[in-house]
Every structure is written in C-alpha cells, then in structure tokens.
Amino acid sequence: MGADSKENSLLENPVASVSDEQQGSPENSQGESALLRLAELAEEFDADQVAGDARSVAERVSEGRFYVACIGQFKRGKSSVLNALVGNSVLPTGVVPVTTVPTIVRYGSHASARVRFEAGGWTDIPVRTVDEYVSEEKNPENAKHIAALEIFVPSPLLATGMCFVDTPGLGSVFTGNTEATQAFIPHIDAALVVIGADPPLAGEELVLVEAVSQHVQDLIIAVNKSDRTTDAERAAAVAFARQQLEKRLQHPVGPLFEVSAAEQLEHRGTGRDWRKLVSSLNQLVEGSGRRLIRAACDRGLERISEQLLAIITEEREALQRPIEDSERRIAALKQTIADAERSMRELGYLFMAEQQRLSDMFVDRHKAFFAHVLPQADQEFDAALTSNAYGLGPSHRRRAFHEAQGVARRYILPWLKAEQEEAEKQYRRVALRFVEMANEFLKKLTDAGIPELARMPHALDPESGFRVRSHFTLMEYIEVAQPASPLRWLADLILGLVGARTIITNDAREFLLRLLETNSIRAQSDILNRVQESRGKLEAEIRKLLHEVSRIAEQALVRAKKVREEGAPAVQAALQRLDSLEQEVRALGLPGT
C-alpha cells in the first residue's frame, strides 16, 4: 500500500542495458534475491498481488535504476536541459507548454521510445513521434490518457542506472500539468531543479522545492538560460534564489550551476558551469545511486514482509485453534466488518464536515471577488462601448458581446490562476486529513474487534493514489457573439434603426455578468469534485482492506481443514514449516528484528 506499489505501476519497465557494475553490486544482488524469494513465498499462499509487487521492486533493483526528476516552472527550459545532458534532442521543446505527462529518459543501446496507455501495456513508437503523446499541443491535458512514456538513449551519463524524468512545468495555464508534477513527487529519488535568471525564482517554485525536499535528500539546482542576462543581472538573480531557497529549506543548498542548454545544444558559448553540472550528476551516481536504490529496496522489503507475516500469523492461528472456533471467529469477523461498514457513516460525516468547510471558504472568497469586480467590470464595459461608434444593430451586438468577453477575460484569468493555487493548497491539506481520519477509523476498528488490522501497519499510505488529478483548465470563453438566427439578426437590425440599441447593450451586459459568474466558480467546482472523488477512493480502499482481512482468514481456514484431514503429524509439520517461513521472512524483510 506504500509509495513503491504505485511507483512501480507508473514506472514499470522491462530490463534495459545498464552497466555490469551497477547490475552486479552486492547490495543490489542481495536485495533482488530477497525480493524474489518473498515473491515465491507470497505465491505459496496465493497472494498474487503481494508477489507481483515484490517482483516489480526486484526488477528495479536488478537494473540499478533510480529516478532524477527534472522539475521547475513552466518555460524554464527543463526539456532542453535534459536533451543537452543526454546529447540528443529526444524531448520536444517549444514556445508553448510542452510536457503533458512525466516522461522517463533512460539508457538504451540505441535511441527508441515506447508509450503506455492507462488502459493497456507498452507500445513501441518512433522517437520522432514522442511529441504526439507528451506535448500540450497534440495531447492537451493528457486527453490521450498516457500513463507513462519512456525514451531510451545511448547516453554514458545514464549507463549506470540513473534515469531522468521530464515533468510538466508549473505555472502554465494548464493546471492539470502542475497537478501531474506534484503527484509525481513521492516517486522520485533525487531532483534536478531548473530555475531561471530572468525572471528570478518564483513563489510557486519555492513551494515545489520544499515539497520535493521532504521526499528526497539530493537536490541539484541549475540556473538555465544564463546567456540571456548580463553578468550583473545573473549574479543578482542567483544571490536572490540562494537566499530564498535557504530561507525556505532552512539549510544550505550547495552550488547553483549557471548554464545554458541552448548554448550546449548548439555547441557555442563558454560552457559556463555545464561541466560542473554533469560532474555533480556523476557524483550523484557514484556517491548516492546505490544508496537511493537500496532505500527503495528496503522500503519494498519492509512492506512486503509485513504483508507476508500477517498471512503467516493467520495461517498458524487457524491450525492451532479448533475448526469450530475459527468458523465462529470468521463469522464474527464478517459481522464486525459489516458493522464497520455501517459505522463508516460516522467517518463520512467527518469527511462531509471537511468538504463543507472547504466549500464555505471558497463561496466566501467568490462572493468577495464578485462584489469587488462587478462594479469595475461594468464600468469598464460601458467605457469600451461609448468609445466606439455604434454601427448597425447586428454589428453593435457583435462588438458589445466581444467587449464583454474581453472585459471578463481581463478580470477572470488572474483571479482563476490565484484561486487555483489556493485550491491546490487546500486540496493537498484535505487529502492528507482524509487519510489521517481513515487511519484513525481503522485503529478504532482494531481496538473494537478486528485486531488483524494491527498486522498491517502501512494500511493507508498518503502516497497510495487517493489524490485525484485536477480537471481545471483556463479555457477560452467559447460563446457565440453573433446572432444565432436570421430572426435575431433582423430584430437587431430593427432595434438599431429605431435607436433601441440599449436592449442589445443590456443583453451584452447580462452576458458579461454570466461570464463572470459561471467562470469565476470553476476552480471552486473543480476542487470540490476532486475532494469528493478522493473521498470515494479512500472509502473504497477501506472496504477493500476490511474484506482482505476476511479473505486471508477464510483462506487460512480452508488450508487448515485440509491439513487436519491428514492427521496430527501433518499439522505439526505445517506449524514447523510456518515457523521456519516466519524466521525466513523476518530475516529477508526485517533484518533488524
């Protein structure tokens, strides 16, 4: 249920070529062997999901893969930096938001690429078509439902297991891209943070770096596009960025590498700090690569061993107690679970209270915005109309409606951007609070009659996918400003001829009001929908966990009945086997116990 299970579903990979040294390191070999052995033991107990999880982690450890995410604000040149690092322009770049989904760049003997859709497996694609799947222009807001895309390149920098992850940029109008980057944070091992000298470090970037620093130990910071500023401007920007970063993180951040990906790709310029940046990445591989891989391996070993120990304990108890007691216990367990599902209404009330508080907060924010903006927008609309000739009735309608669109856009777009940032902040808080309340609920169930839950300490992990991606976008105002029919056109013509253009103007004013009203609540609607969906996912996961406890108990009883039919010696042998397996699992997954 921890972060690795989701990580492996996102970053599932076949074996790629990495260095023999990285693949064959003692730590990796031992971790891989332990994970594969745990997978075999899980299969003995028909725990296929546990076995699959173990094999996925083992594959990553075997390949010596660890992930360095390239993160930063929209238009910092992240994709260009990665292209320059691997020496091949495999990632699309452009003047509009490009990266829609996290894109993995890893080592391969030759350049190739593959894509995985949310509903299927991997499909090989030509490298030249990558932009068809990851660019905002050709896959807006990930409309093609791409789960992952990988590009393989013969880069020496990646030959020892390091993989780059190109993430969607923060701060573009496509806020779903920001959400994709934030959702990816728990699945990275280190980060290459790309900032700029002009403009300098933004507040949203500070928040991102702080969030990343809570998950990873290694941060490498590059100041890209250094060729576009003077030495004095760049020095001031770097000093400002360092001051703000260290203030936010409360510790030194190390060097800020001044680079220009454009110069590097075009083989011009002085190189600036490019060699130092590459050297820092190589040091990350040599000094931290194995540690990062080992940490991921240890997390997987601990989680999988806990799940297996819970199964083994249940199997042992089923063999030791009378069959009738086990049957009564399972019946009582089912009844307790049924009662627990009914008592989830109480948890639902807590969820509803959080939702209502959030709704009230955004309703108040919207009311305050509307009361402040409407008089100004109305005044600006009147001024725009009086500054131009009226024209005929139909042309007056078109111009009035277009003016309404322009006025609304000038007020709404800045508001929605700020509102979405606040919504994202509140959503992360509520999503975490939901998980905390759910775990408190499970603890109460443990105390009230389902002690088996105590054997699964990582029951609900905040990183397990309960957060829902935003569907909010700053869309254009799509509304027909021309008459919808010949009758409307004729009516407008008559109104213009008789000097009754005020009727048309009032229609446009109502249109302006509607634009302001309906569009200014879109961020509010988006977050409330996401909170509701997250709540549904979390409640479903609780039910799944409760029924899994029951399934393990029932399966253990079925096995116990079969063994008992073979007599006391078989029971004794089975118990000894379970004792041996428990010792083995503890040695493999919990060496410190």
Image: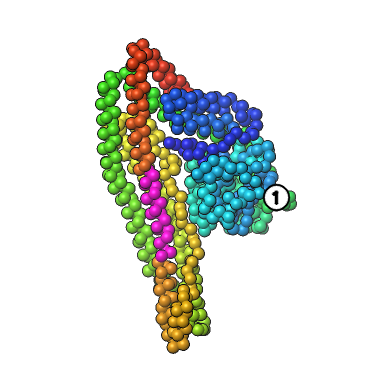
Query: In the rendered structure, which amino acid carries the disc numbered 1?
Result: Leu
Among all residues in the image, which is located at the extreme right?
Answer: 268
Q: Residue at x 49, y 55 (%)?
A: 175
State the extent of the magenta-drawn residues as a range.
518-538
From this view, report whether residue 157 is shown above or below residue 328: below
Q: Is residue 53 left or right of residue 368?
A: right
Q: Residue at x 68, y 52 (%)?
A: 262
Is residue 322 or residue 407 the one in the foreground?
322
From this view, report whether residue 438 is shown above or below residue 474: above
Residue 103 in percent (x, y) is at: 58, 45
Question: Magenta span has 140?
Answer: no
Q: Residue at x 25, y 26 (%)?
A: 328
Question: Magenta span has 529?
Answer: yes
Among all residues in the image, which is located at the extreme front?
Answer: 486
Quarter the C terminus occupies: top left
Q: Quadrant of residue 563?
A: top left
Residue 585 in percent (x, y) is at: 45, 23
Q: Quadrant of residue 62?
A: top right
Residue 551 in percent (x, y) is at: 35, 30
From this view, report whether residue 547 is shown above or below residue 493: above
Please tell me whether the stretch drawn in magenta is mainly helix, strand or loop.
helix
Among all residues in the image, which is located at the extreme top?
Answer: 569
Q: Is residue 249 left or right of residue 269?
A: left
Q: Please, what secondary structure does the residue beneath circle 1 have?
A: helix
The colour mode here is rainbow
Residue 151 appears in view: no
Quarter the N terminus occupies: top left
Q: Residue at x 45, y 52 (%)?
A: 470
Residue corresponding to mark 1: 265
